Image (cartoon, grey):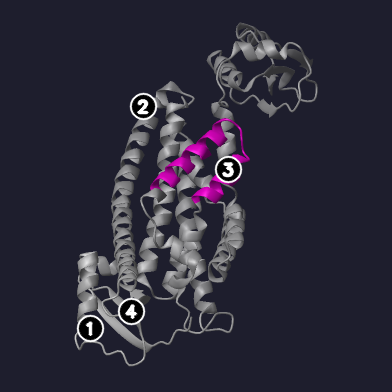
Amino acid sequence: MRLVQVFVPRGELDLVLETVESTGLDYGVAAETSHDEFEAIVSIPTPPPGVEPLLEALRRAGLDEQAYTVVTAAETVVSSRADDLHGQFSGTRISREELQARAADLAPAASTYYALLVVSTIIATAGLLLDSAATIIGAMVVAPLMGPALAASVGVVVDDENLAQRGVTLQISGLVLAVVTAAVLGWVLRGTVLLPPGLDITTIPQVAERISPTLLALFLALGSGVAGVISLVRDVGSVLVGVAIAVALIPPAATAGLGIAWGDPTVVITAGTLVLVNMLSINLTALLLLWLAGYRPAQDTDLERAYGRLRSRVLVLGVAIVLLTAVLGGVTYGTYQTAAVEHDVQTELEAMSADPPLEGVAFQEVAFEYELLDVYTGQQPVATVLVERPPGTELPDNFADDVRERLETATGTSLEVIVELVETQRSH
């Protein structure tokens, strides 16, 4: 339930009461004596879907916007009349005015926003380098990036240019700050006793997870945007924490920063693509869902302008997402190719060990070098194969070529094969 309190300017009490009565809502009137400008306070209990029609009726009646109209959440209402009030209004979304207020809260003061962003980026960077999933989740909860995305979308659909611009500015500056913070931290830590010498960040599982994004990341981002809008318009703020964890904006941004610190452009491109896809998808879904939910500017004269801005932003976001999706598609295909070739090599080596070309010989893969970029640069996969043979067993001079040909036939790919021979004695 909501309690709407209207501070009625002098001479307009009858107008306010007639308007409230026309909506069918109950109300109470209290005299206002603390300020000469107001003559009474009208308190009106209403369910959330009734707030917007009530405020719209007061606006159409000509109530001066300089008057105070306060909407507060009523934690508990003890009255048998409450059920009747709920029956008068359908729907579950909050009013436009409440939406704007909540969106403004999601785009906090710059000092608070940037402080939380730096802290969350430091936590995420440490979690990535430590390969600690729990630490990274903690960074996701602290990160404030989700709020400005929703605030920007709300600003567009209700024609609040200041809110929309603030949301966009906080998003762009926040992402840049997160990447720079992670890059600086990575550069400071690299080569110190806190990290192993010669550390390859791509071998860290938590980093590797964010530099191999697939098309599934797009569906995750779109779903997170839907959940974020639902939590906002239906007043379920706790869901935003889960959305922040699901969409994970800060960890890939921190990964991109580490890629800069380590001078690895592949890490920067793949992680950067992931964070941009997430952010843009949230903005796109928020814009579309808020408009479909029926949110519009307060003044009908502003409707055309808001719709024009909505169309232009949806177009820009859509084109950007399509381009980034092409990158995700390339990563998805490249990741599949590398995994498929390695799987075929392993399967064929197992078959060769089960039915060896020479008695007592066994095959094992000890290393496989085939990276994402190799798929597109034409670089040959390199498979290192350990061959166990009984002592004194002679192998043909072209044994390595025979192994390579079998593996190439199995994978359908040109390979470079390195054969390492060891003499093995087995006792049963």
Q: Quadrant of residue 68?
A: top right
- Which mark's residue is nearer the viewer, 2 or 1? 1
Residue sitting at x 59%, y 80%: 194
Comparing 6 with 313, the one in front is 313
Residue sitting at x 52%, y 40%: 228
Can you identify the residue that label 3 sits on? Answer: 240
Comparing 27 with 242, the one in front is 242
Judged from the image, the secondary structure of the residue bearing numbered disc 2 is helix
The residue under label 4 is which amino acid type?
Answer: Val
Question: Are the two marked residues, 1 and 4, in contact with CB atoms closer than 8 angstroms?
Answer: no
Q: Is residue 378 visible from the viewing direction of this image?
A: no
The residue under label 2 is which amino acid type?
Answer: Glu
Can you identify the residue that label 4 sits on? Answer: 385
Q: Which residues are magenta?
A: 218-247
Q: Quadrant of residue 132?
A: bottom right
- Which mark's residue is nearer the viewer, 3 or 2? 3
Mark 2 burial class by Cα count in 10 Å: few <14, some 14-19, many 20+: few
The residue under label 3 is which amino acid type?
Answer: Leu
**Image location (x, y in percent) of residue 359:** 31, 80
**Image location (x, y in percent) of residue 309:** 36, 36
Residue sitting at x 57%, y 70%: 130
Can you identify the residue that label 1 sits on? Answer: 399
Q: Is residue 370 magenta?
A: no
The residue under label 1 is which amino acid type?
Answer: Phe
Can you identify the residue that label 2 sits on? Answer: 304
